[in-house]
Image: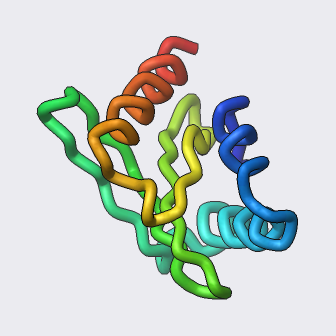
Amino acid sequence: MVRFTLEAFSDLEEFETEVRRKLLDEIEEQLEESREEADITVIQRPSYGAEFPRLKLTENDLNHRIYFDYLDSEIYVFAVRHREDAYSPEDMEEAVERLEKLREL
């Protein structure tokens, strides 16, 4: 089961309703049902002391990056970004803060 942090839900709320629906459908399908075929890469940012999986969504008019982690056999999405906003220094700093908060659970 895919779970979302409160921050990830806040990210989703920034998108239009139709985009949000597509994102939720794609996240569920790719992380729960077809993970082996999904475009997942481990993001390594040693300068931030972070390493976490990222799902790349580029179908159905999407161009988004989903940052997630595994915790107690569950998948937790902690950030949802449009590609234009992903990977900037500010984005990485915020992602690392969210990841650290998640791993403290």
- Please, which residue is most extreme toward the left here? 47
Left or right of residue 47, residue 83 in this image? right
Q: Quadrant of residue 21?
A: bottom right
In depth, the one of 65 and 69 nearer the eye is: 65
Give the number of callouts. Answer: 0
In depth, the one of 95 and 99 nearer the eye is: 95
Residue 30 picture location, percent across and down:
61, 70
Residue 84 picture location, percent across and down:
43, 64
Residue 66 vertical position relative to residue 21 in the rendered view, above or below: above
Left or right of residue 68, residue 29 in this image? right
**Residue at image coords 21%, 46%:** 44
Residue 38 picture location, percent across and down:
49, 74
**Residue at image coords 57%, 38%:** 78
Residue 34 picture location, percent across and down:
60, 74
- Please, which residue is most extreme toward the top here? 104
**Residue at image coords 43%, 23%:** 97
Residue 59 vertical position relative to residue 35 in the rendered view, above or below: below
- Please, which residue is most extreme toward the bottom here? 60
**Residue at image coords 50%, 12%:** 104
Q: How is the image coloured?
A: rainbow
Split into 4 quadrants, where in the image is the C terminus?
top right
